Amino acid sequence: MALSTNLLVFRDVGEQISGRGLLLRLREAVLRMKVGQPDSLLTALIVAGELECSLADSASRSVTQAASITDALAGAILERVSLDLAHIFSLLCGLEHSLPDSVRISHPEGFSYYALHPADFSDAAARSAEHASVGVIGIRSIGTTLSSMTRSALTRKGISASRITVRPTGHPYDRKTELTSSEAAWLEQHRQKGSVFLIVDEGPGLSGSSFLSVAEALEQHGISSDRITLLGTRDVDPAHLCAHDATRRWLRYRWRKAGSTITRAYSDYPPLSSGSWRGELLAARAEWPASWPEMERLKFFAPDHHHILKFDGLARHGERNRQRAQALFEAGFAPRPVQAKAAMAAYEFVPGSPLTPAELSTEVLERMAEYCAFRARFLRAEAQGDPLTEMLRCNLWQEMRVELDVPPAYLQSETAVIPDCRMQPHEWIKSSNGALVKVDGNGDGEGHFLPGPTDILWDLAGAIIEWNMNSGAAEYLLAQFQKHGNRVDEARLSWFLLAYSVFRLSYCKMARSSTQDVAEKPRLDNAILHYKTHVNSGLQRAAILQGDR
């Protein structure tokens, strides 16, 4: 299969940090374990995996010590016993003087956005323990932590197991894996022992090429395909993978799917994921907004319908989301967050009606302006490069063969915020007491999709486009926003309107191309037409602005 659409919609969620800074982050996580803070062990494991992964990517000699810390934490999670913290601190001290000045962290997306729990792979590994000796290969980034949990689960069952991690390189749809001399030596030792091999990673994604590249690298080193098992997180139809000759290549290997620990914990709760929230929460005759079902966050309705439970992320990512949720609630904009179990966040359900575009009013516009002003003031963040300019240029050229000269810095901001990114009418609830409540406002701005931290103009542009505002409504929204002490540069807003429209058009085209939900495609077609209309309007404004320069 060749993916018919390949547009920029995902963002780089990596982070550059000093080696000492990352070590300090891990030390702080371990200290939290010492005082018994909830989920501190899980947080420490994820940070340890990030440290090990970054050291492996930089070919640091300290990676072996870092791997020992990851393995110790993984073992403690599985055994559910107290950890030898003195040993962990000793290993941390040993790392202190041998770290690179700077390392790059690729944040584990499954732990942050897609409800993947490290225990998922330990359960899957325990069920697949059919051999006396196993070589575990984690695909970096997230495969670092997953390989540690897999190895620990195998050794717990008395199986001889060791692990390495690898980093496939090249185009996302055509990855290649080259083993280092030490990795090849490890592989040869396992081959001579007659081991079988588990390749572990989240996914596969759209192409499956990372899994395939590692499996084929093993074959090139003398491992027969019948001794190779791929272990990931979703059901796979090889015919839908867009890597070259994917079906033939994929079927050479065994495939095993890791079940979801979190989903099992909520098996009795009505699901709200994969677009099903529309049937539960929208009016019976309401026109359903388009969805990319496979990319939605995991959500459930509490059986008593008093709460909605949502996966907001594990470790540091989840903590930040919960802090934002609390701030939005205390400011009067969002539902009350409450404690939940099994790595989920819970929010009080707001009885009422989701708004429709026909309900746009001065009251709604004033509320949106107040909300954006709050985010601009209190939810600030550090901007990361200029991804919107690259997205705009690339996607416009691919979709419309338009070559656009974007003025320097027009899509950047010196005062970036965590945007809401969900300003559609149905995201606003008119509660039973008449209040306008904004739901789902705490997580998407740091999610897997563009833009990431950016100017609040992204949300203002989103509101204008999603509500299909006429010029009078848009001017009123901006005037109300400026009453809160903010300034709007109309030229920059025009570029943000175009960038937002192009992104949403690209998102819907990628969703339509990749989703296996046939019923969703007509809704995505309608959304594509809607955003294309706004793109054309934005291009006309851009031409006028460029003519004025």
Image (spheres, grey):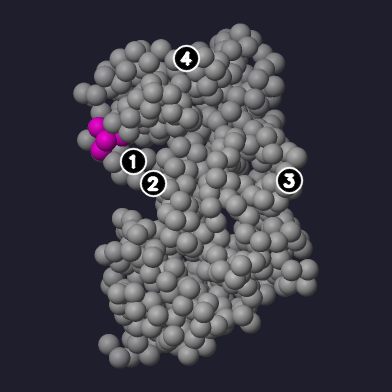
- For marks 4 and 1 on the same chain, the one whose residue lies earlier in the sequence: 4
Q: Which residues are magenta?
A: 18-22
What's the residue type where badge 4 is placed?
Ser
Residue 87 position (above or below residue 166)? above
What's the residue type where badge 1 is placed?
Arg
Dot 4 and dot 3 residues touching (CB under 8 Å): no
Marks 4/3: CA–CA distance: 35 Å
What's the residue type where badge 3 is placed?
Pro
Q: Quadrant of residue 218?
A: top right
Name the quadrant of the C terminus.
bottom left
> In the rendering, which numbered label is found on residue 14?
2
User: Viewer-nearest of labels 3 and 1?
Assistant: 3
- For marks 2 and 1 on the same chain, the one whose residue lies earlier in the sequence: 2
Answer yes or no: is residue 167 visible: yes
Residue at coordinates 24% horizontally, 24% vertically from top-left? 96
> In the rendering, which numbered label is found on residue 303?
3
